[in-house]
Amino acid sequence: MTRNVIRSGWLIAAVALLAAAVVRGAQAEEVSRPVAIEGAVEIPFVSEASGEAFRLLLWRPDGPAPKGGYPVLYSFDGEDSFALLTDIARMLNPAATRVGVAPVAVAAIAYPPGRASPDRRVFDLTPPAASATGSHRMPERPNGKPWPKLGGGDAFLDMLESEVKPRVRSALGVETAAQTLFGHSLGGLMVLRRLVTDPTAFDCYAASSPSLWVDDRRMLADMAAFLASSPKEGRRPRLQVSVGSAEEDLGPFDPVQGKELEARRRWIANNAMVTNARSLARVAEAGKGRAVAFAYREYEARAHQPAKVDAALDAIGLALECAGR
């Protein structure tokens, strides 16, 4: 009897010690960890052309590659756009596959951690100057500082073609199907630049709130010239242009008084985001049925950054439509 009681006591103690160890182990497991995007990889590379370091952020859907390869949505500003686009793609892809449309993959260009800067982005996402002097005609910046170096956009687009696309194909392990290019703000401007300089580079183009004010609205003239000179026959790329209807208004986080407020007012007035987007829509509509299949969207009550969220949703939709053509 006593022996059984002792044995029971040891058993209870052992169970208690084991339970305590499990609790301590569970507590030790409760440490914060970075959250990874399932299905995504990061491919650092140094551009052969410029010697600059970049990151390719790539997400592929679950399951085997579809026959004919993945349609791919390419995006600028991967630091901000990649997680947003992949989340939307993950949400919409299953519905697309149910109707026989291949799921879209997402590829975005980003800078290395700690290496991104407004100046570097401005250089990479502005076209060369239109003037013979090589000088851009630019508005006063809200902070009053001089503009940084401009005009590296064509080299950036060349890198996308010659260095990024091959890495995407290699990482996916298959040739890619329909390809769509998405960009917001200066990225939206570069989407249009790619269209007018090499319309066959992508099947579909999604320009979100494009910065048409750059170089005294040169892109409006470039688009008109492109549409006028494009052949009537042949496969037409699809172009989707969007803007937020509140992009010419002061927002809740803008300055409310003083010189900063006036500088912000001048900046918004000069950028004329909605006015310029509507002008571009009129230009594109004139060429509709010839050079491009065109769609224009204006997001009600959306300011500049919130409009990007709506545009990202429509960009994934466009990429899926492009895949189903």
Image (tube, rainbow, N blue to C red):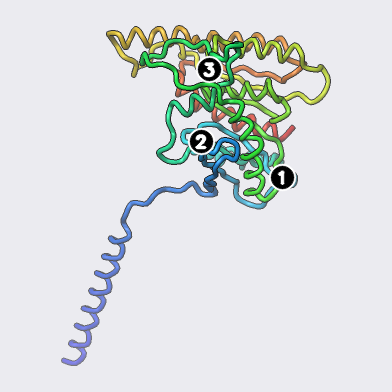
* Disc 3 and disc 2 in contact, CB within 8 angstroms: no
Q: Is residue 272 left or right of residue 324?
A: left
In the image, 88 versus 274, the foreground residue is: 274
Which is more toward the observer, 116 or 187?
A: 116
Percent x, y of residue 147: 44, 18
- The quarter holding residue 104 reads top right
Which of the marked residues, 1 or 3, is nearer the chain's N terminus?
1
What residue is drawn where x is 31% and y is 12%? Answer: 260
- Residue annotated with mark 1: 175
Category of crowding for the residue at label 1, using alpha-carbon neighbours closer than 10 angstroms: few (below 14), some (14–19), many (at least 20): some
Of the image marks 1 and 2, the number of the one nearer the N terminus: 2
Are there few (<14), some (14-19), or many (20+) residues within 10 Å of tag 3? Answer: many
Observer-nearest residue: 101 or 127?
A: 127
x 72%, y 20%: residue: 293
As drawn, is 246 to the left or to the right of 51? Answer: left
Instruction: Please say whether residue 248 is visible from this viewpoint.
Output: yes
Q: Residue at x 60, y 35 (%)?
A: 74
- Give the camera-side residue of 88 and 45: 45
Vertical order, 70 against 196 (above or below): below
Q: Which residue is mark 2?
A: 78
Q: Residues within 10 Å of mark 2 (few under 14, many from 20)?
A: many
Q: Amino acid at mark 1?
A: Glu
Of the numbered discs in the image, which one, if any, rests on residue 211?
Answer: 3
Which residue occupies the extreme front position in the image? 133
For label 2, the SS is helix
Of helix, strand and loop, which one carries label 3?
A: loop
- Marks counted in the figure total 3
Res 98 seen here: no
Q: How far across and how far down the image is residue 79, in percent?
A: 47, 36
